[in-house]
Amino acid sequence: MLTKEELPECPVATTVQLIGSKWKLLIIRNLQMRPWRFNELKKNLEGISQKVLTDSLRSMEEDGIIVRTVYPEMPPRVEYSLSKLGESMKPILDAMEQWGNNYKASLETDGGKKEMS
């Protein structure tokens, strides 16, 4: 986890640094539904490479956004879920979903020329 001194002064820049990649946002979106296994995420996130998924999960675990649970089974089963900090990001993703839906609706009604409300 980064220290306060290592984070940008701007709170928006801090948020972008923690979850600003396309893949991290989509991983968080999925983990809001339920815990996921690595291969489930890989199959669901079309186009993500194994390396990017691994790096994203490790980074978010280090930042305290997700929890990695290893079950003592043979073969070992690993699941990823949101931590309390990760769950606190739900309003951010909800706002992004609402904005995306409004944007799509504006394109259907007027070709995107009208301002969104």
Image (spheres, grey):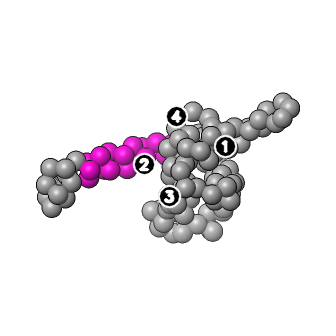
Q: Which residues are magenta?
A: 86-104
Secondary structure, mark 3, is helix
Image spot of residue 25 (x, y percent): 50, 52
Q: Residue 52: in sight, yes or no?
A: yes
Q: Disc 4 or 2, which lies upstream in sequence?
A: 4
Q: Nearer the viewer, residue 9 or 105?
A: 105
Secondary structure, mark 1, is helix
Q: Which residue is mark 1?
A: 39
Taking the spot 32% from the left edge, 50% from the top edge, the residue there is 100
Q: Which residue is mark 3?
A: 22
Residue 92 has which mark?
2
> What kind of secondary structure does the magenta stretch mostly adopt?
helix
Q: Nearer the viewer, residue 107 or 47?
A: 47
Q: Label 3 is placed on what type of residue?
A: Lys
Taking the spot 63% from the left edge, 68% from the top edge, the residue there is 6
Is 109 included in the stretch rendered in magenta?
no
Residue that extends furthest to the top in the rendered view of this protein: 73
Q: Which residue is mark 4?
A: 33
Callout 3 crowding tier (Cα within 10 Å): few <14, some 14–19, many ≥20: few
Which dot, 1 or 2, sits closer to the camera? 1
Taking the spot 14% from the left edge, 58% from the top edge, the residue there is 114
